[in-house]
Amino acid sequence: MPETAVDRIDAAILALFAAEPRVGVLEASRRLRIARGTVQARLDKLASRGVVTGWGPDLDAAALGFPVTAFVTLEIAQTGHDEIGARLAAIPEVIEVHTITGGGDLLARVVARSNADLQRVIDQVVATDGIGRTSTAIALATQVPHRVLPLLLAAAGDEHAGAVDR
């Protein structure tokens, strides 16, 4: 069985930084009653292991002027998922692409300024070399936003992991 990714101290540190990204290491150590060096060392270790993937601000596409979200299932020519993924990454409105099983080969999350603008985005996606058929579902509302914090708490063995919003 693989080593546990995080313990309760890691979880407490990461939960604090998730709730208050600008808290700072010194303030985090004060609040958590852990030595500053311990907080910094644990953050460095979590980052080097890939548990922490970034420190940038979370951005809201709708607040940036892209309120329409759609999920596009793509059937591709079997020339290579990586090549097609790289081509799709050149389209700014394509914000996520995953290789999937089932009825399609790739699933893309795209955003647009309006439903009419979504047609332009889909046209760009379809014009990408290697893409055949597509199927699009427009998101009407977000019931559970992207979140990882409950997984952090579950990995650390916190029995209250399901009650966390982020």
Image (cartoon, helix red, strand yellow):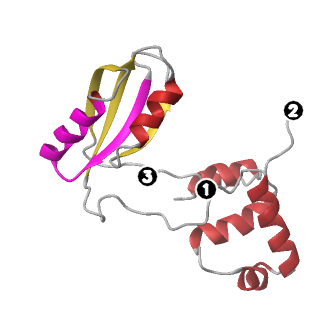
- What secondary structure is found at the residue carrying circle 3? loop
Please say if 52 is above or below 140: below
- In x, y percent, where is residue 129? 35, 24
Q: Dot 1 surroundings within 10 Å: few (below 14), some, or many (20 or more)?
A: some
The residue lying toward the viewer, choosing from 77 and 106, is 77
Determine whether label 1 and label 3 are within 8 Å by CB.
no
- In x, y percent, where is residue 117? 17, 46
Query: Would you say residue 81 sits in the magenta stretch?
Result: no
Residue type of the residue flagged with mark 1? Leu
Is residue 34 in view? no
The residue lying toward the viewer, choosing from 121 and 46, is 121
| Disc number placed over residue 145 in the picture, else none | 3
How far apart in space, not on screen, are marks 2 and 1 (Cα)? 22 Å
- What secondary structure is found at the residue carrying circle 2? loop
Image quarter of residue 13: bottom right
Residue shown at the point (81%, 73%) measured from the top left: 39
Q: Which residues are magenta?
A: 106-125
Residue type of the residue flagged with mark 2? Met
- In x, y percent, where is residue 57? 50, 68
The residue lying toward the viewer, choosing from 73 and 20, is 73
Check disc 1 and report the residue beneath it.
Answer: 149
Q: Dot 2 surroundings within 10 Å: few (below 14), some, or many (20 or more)?
A: few
- In x, y percent, where is residue 151? 64, 48
Left or right, 103 with respect to 56, comes to left
Check disc 2 and report the residue beneath it.
Answer: 1
Image quarter of residue 102: top left
Residue shown at the point (83%, 80%) measured from the top left: 36
Outermost residue, left side: 116
